[in-house]
Image (cartoon, rainbow, N blue to C red):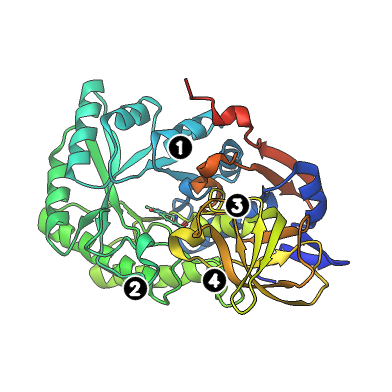
Amino acid sequence: MICDNITSKDGILYFAGQNTVELAKKYGTPLYLMDEDKIREKCRSYKKAFEKHFGPEAQPLYASKANCFKRIYEIMAEENMGIDVVSSGEIYVALKAGFDLSHAYFHSNNKTDEDIAYAIENGIGYFVADNVEEVKAVEAEAAKRGIKQKLILRLTPGIDPHTYEAIATGKVDSKFGTPIETGQADEIVEFTLKQEHVILDGFHCHVGSQVFGEDIFERAAEVMLEFTAHMRDKVGYTARVLDLGGGYGVRYTENDPYLDIETKVGQVAEVIKATCQRLNLEVPEIHMEPGRSIVADAGMTLYTAGTVKIIPGYKNYVSIDGGMPDNPRFALYGSDYTCLPANKMDEKRDFECSIVGRCCESGDIIQEHVMMPSSIGRYDTVAVCTTGAYNYSMASNYNKLPRPAVVMLKGGNENYLVVKRETFEDLIRHDL
Ligand code: LLP
């Protein structure tokens, strides 16, 4: 199986030690499952690797855009993780979960004045300023309040992460960050240092997501450290913090490699230490912002199959009771997924089909070329693995489908609701 929390027994699929068919019956479908133990295990691997390689100050921050609801912020607080937030909405949810915002880093390439005011009001730890305009806006808001606001600068190191285009962000031609190559990074650092109400505490980069490339993070770290040394030599400013963003890839299918977090962090650490030595720099406080690699394989979505359509000589379709509104990733990126017949795990899988949603749109596909048992049909439970990242957080109400519930699984036998299934009433909540 693609992850150690997926097993089967007597023809039934188990996730995090629990019978998925029973869970589908208990909570209904479509249903998002989240494995709390797996989330905590991933947080702990990051914490342990950071502590081992960079010391106690170094910080993994959970990129909460990957999956954002109150309970996840509670878990992050309990695991002593910092967080990366990207909107006032995410800040609001974190606050409602009682998360201490001094451990939060506020991203995004276009924070409004209202966002900035809201974040400062609620004690945001850091802004990650994307561009000069944002530095000016944070300075103005901080000046109004007579405070000094900590901030780090998002720079683009000019690195191609070799992932799909929509989630590659480290190249010079990107809407994110201020490029090093064009000299604009020099300018923004010099500009920020002149501001009275912001404290420049370091640099940030994020090269992309679902990254498997051997040396991508290492190269990004080198470019960032060279820039750090360059600014030290040019203006006498040495960045205290270096944040390398998120991006480690996860296994969606058996073809994807498995990345061991401790090994990967160790490899980056070696390059950072060697580069710092070469440049005569003290090793900065290192941060990373993993999202997907913390929650992706802690998630699974359960659906109930409906119509099976066989078009001889063409293709077979198995329709499920969800689709692109709860998982838009195939439609957007052509993402791979592993789909399993949850109540027929022991049957031979010799029926090739596309697993498709129930929306009025041909692009509403979860996965193509899936092998299912030929008996698959109405009332069977279909599981889609590795849906813990960027599924619930990207879900919509397209075709007025209510968003599914999120259920947390724990300790091999406990399960509890963390987000209720939307009702029809929710669908008209804002209609006048
Ligand atoms: N830090 C920054 C600044 C980011 O922009 C992101 C992701 C992360 C951290 C977390 O990256 P991760 O560890 O999750 O790869 N919706 C797309 C992914 C978009 C990623 C956006 N930024 C998808 O479904 O694949």
Label 1 CA crowd tier, 10 Å (few <14, some 14–19, many 20+): some
Residue under numbered circle 1: 90
Which residue was labeled with disc 4? 259
Q: CA distance from mark 2 to mark 1?
A: 37 Å
Instruction: Indicate which label's residue lies in the foreground, 2 or 1.
Output: 1
Q: How far is the residue under mark 2 from the one under mark 4?
A: 23 Å
- Distance Cα–Cα, label 3 vs label 4: 34 Å
Q: Is mark 1 within 8 Å of ligand 1?
A: no
Question: For the residue labelled by badge 2, is the local secondary structure a helix, a strand or a loop?
Answer: helix
Q: Which mark is residue 274?
A: 2
Q: Earlier in the sequence, mark 2 or mark 4?
A: 4
Q: Is residue 105 toward the left or the right of residue 264 in the image? A: left
Q: Amino acid at mark 2?
A: Ala
- Determine the secondary structure under disc 1: helix
Q: Is residue 129 above or below residue 275?
A: above
Task: Give the percent coordinates (x, y) of residue 382.
Answer: 71, 60
Q: CA distance from mark 3 to mark 1?
A: 29 Å
The residue at the point 54 percent across, 71 percent down is 259
The answer to which of 357 and 80 lies nearer the viewer is: 357
> In the image, what residue occupies the spot 49% across and 70% down?
264
Q: Which residue is mark 3?
A: 358
Q: Give how far apart the Cα atoms at labels 1 and 4 are.
A: 28 Å
Mark 3: amino acid: Arg
Comparing marks 1 and 4, which lies closer to the viewer?
Answer: 1
Q: Amino acid at mark 4?
A: Leu
